[in-house]
Image (cartoon, rainbow, N blue to C red):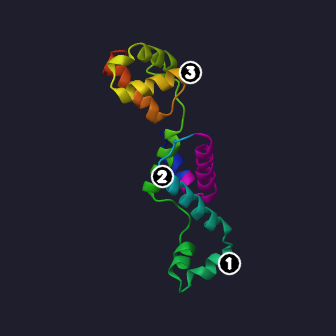
Amino acid sequence: MASHREMHAVSSDPAKVRNLALSLLALAKTAESVFTEWELTFLKDIAEQSAEIMSLTRQERKDFKFSKERAEALLALRDFRLTALQAEKLFEIRDATELHGDIAGISVRNLIVRCHEARLDLDEGDERFVERLWRSGVGELRRNDLLRLKRCSKQLGELEEHM
């Protein structure tokens, strides 16, 4: 989870925002179904907005301040800063892409093997999910898959409820 200080530092710098958004978009090209359509649209919009701000010269900004075009005036008046909600969402998306190798000190690979052995006690969708993980041989998962594995592990008794 990003700290408030980190969110503030990044959200007020268009170059940092653009770099973060572009790196996440690059990840979307290499890994399948990492982001929802909404998240992809959000990342593209944030990258474009920050690029627009970065492309303005000081004189253009000054000229745009008094423009009759509302969009130009807003662009010029806005010292680039994401809203708190935009920054939180950007960092939430970033955090969801991080790979995790363990749950409460138990390796993900070990949990996958344990769940695979007891997979017939799961519903059909979760059974296929565990089977897919087991066949892939992965040892690290992103947050959404990690949470699903954790839920399956608790259901099968491989993890205690409080974990």
Mark number displayed over residue 59: 1
Q: Earlier in the sequence, mark 2 or mark 3?
A: 2
Q: Whole-Å distance between the Cαs marked 1 and 2?
A: 37 Å
Q: Residues within 10 Å of mark 3 (few under 14, many from 20)?
A: few
| Residue 68 at x, y percent in the picture | 53, 86
Q: Is residue 23 magenta?
A: yes
Residue type at tag 3? Gly
Residue at the (43%, 26%) spot, across then down: 128
| Residue 43 at x, y percent in the picture | 54, 54
Q: Earlier in the sequence, mark 1 or mark 3?
A: 1
Q: Is residue 14 magenta?
A: yes
Q: Which residue is mark 3?
A: 137
Q: Earlier in the sequence, mark 1 or mark 2?
A: 2
Q: Is disc 3 placed on a helix, strand or loop?
A: loop
Residue type at tag 1? Gln
Q: Are marks 2 and 3 in contact (CB under 8 Å)?
A: no
Stretch of the chain drawn in magenta: 10-31
Residue at the (53%, 43%) spot, across then down: 94
Q: Which residue is mark 2?
A: 37
- Extreme-bottom residue of the structure: 68
Q: Residues within 10 Å of mark 1 (few under 14, many from 20)?
A: few
State whether residue 139 appears in this view.
no
Q: Are marks 1 and 2 in contact (CB under 8 Å)?
A: no
- Observer-nearest of 110 and 1: 110
Residue type at tag 2? Glu
Residue at the (45%, 32%) spot, across then down: 145
Q: Whole-Å distance between the Cαs marked 1 and 3?
A: 56 Å
Discs 1/2, front: 2
